[in-house]
Amino acid sequence: MSRFSKKKSSGTPAISTASLPDIVFILLFFFMVSTTMRQTNLLVKNTLPYADQVEKLDKKDLISYIYIGAPSSRYQSTFGTEARIQLNDKYASLSEIRDFVYSERAAMRQELVPYLTIALKVDEESNMGLVSDVKQELRKAEALKINYTTKEGSATQNVH
Amino acid sequence: MARRPAEEINAGSMADIAFLLLIFFLVTTTIITDQGINRKLPPIQPPQENPPPIKEKNIFIVLINKNDQLLVEDKPMQIEDIREAAVSFLDNGGGTGKEACNYCEGARDPESSDNPIKAVVSVQSDRQTQYGTYIAVQNELVAAYNQLRDRAAEQLYNVSFIQMEEDYKDPSYNGDKTVLKEKITKIQDMFPLKISEAEPKRN
């Protein structure tokens, strides 16, 4: 009757690695949930200017992006070097901005629509003319909250 | 009866599969959040017959030409000096009587702005101006406002304005957020951000 007697172990038992997949899966789920895939591939050159008086853009679902810049080098043979606007995955003209804003609004939940921010990712070498045309279009579409997306750094680096 | 014990499935390679997936997501994840200068565009209004008059001395004019050169209040200037010039303009407090500014520490030059509440910064750029220069100017102007707001916040509440804004956004801040919001609004009212942008000149 040795019901409570301990088994005698010989040597150190092997550590069970059966729970290793569980740990890895937890990590995996974390990254799956927190990942936001790059939705668009850039068709324009996009070297952002530097600024240090910046605010963070947290809620990614409230932000729509407009890219402006000269076409990337592999598209320059077909589209030239003049700065262009990119909406979603293609080049767009000024008149398409309003439709873009409306469709972005339509895709959002009703109560979040007033918080829609348009992030302007503009190449530092583009001209203000195009940027202000875009801003005029945004005003017409009543998308008034904008953000000039920048890189962190001293603004004096922008002036060459 | 001889019963065959159920054979254990080797789960050793499960970890490898999971690791493979993990590495894929690690590589594609972008944790970095974007940052930038927030602005609110003015809504389009029907042209007013009589726009409210603004005194000439309450306007701080920054011109950027197509060669990215700056003209601030009719004087050529380097980008590094704009912040200082803007601070001394906004903080001037040259007004008297009803328009006096009791928290300004500036030179009280009657030729410069009356009051930070009245003061307007006007940025005019050319269509050929480079975006980088424009952002640099905007950044320096925001920096001037932040400097003054920081000073006011330090004097009134012993905390910097930037810190107050960060606390307000921080969900784990253990203080009264409505009080904090009131404080922030008060400082913002002391130095309201008034940057007006004319449409770039066409030439």
Image (tube, rainbow, N blue to C red):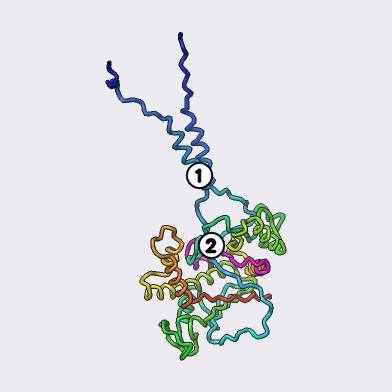
| Viewer-side residue, B20 vs B63 | B20
- Percent position (x, y) of residue A94? 70, 64
Residue A59 can be seen, yes or no: yes
Q: How far from the left and from the top, in percent, is residue B92?
A: 45, 84
Is residue A98 found left or right of B110 in the rendered image?
A: right
Q: Which residue is drawn at 51% across and 48% down?
A: A34
User: Is residue B145 rendered magenta in the image?
Assistant: no
Viewer-proximal residue, A37 or B132? A37
Nearest the viewer among A20 and B62 is A20
Which residue is the site of mark 2?
A150
Quarter in which the C terminus of chain B is drawn: bottom right
Disc 1: host chain: A
Q: Badge 1 local density, few (<14 within 10 Å), some, or many (20+)? A: many
Please check whether the numbered discs 2 and 1 fall on a single chain.
yes
Which label is found at residue A148?
none
Secondary structure found at label 1 = helix
User: Residue at horizontal 50%, vertical 51%?
Assistant: B31
What residue is shown at x 66% (from left), y 57% (from top)? A106
Residue type (three-letter) at the residue carrying disc 1: Phe
* Residue at the disc numbered 1: A31
Query: What residue span does the magenta drawing correspond to?
Result: A136-157
Mark 2 or mark 1: name the one nearer the start of the chain.
Answer: 1
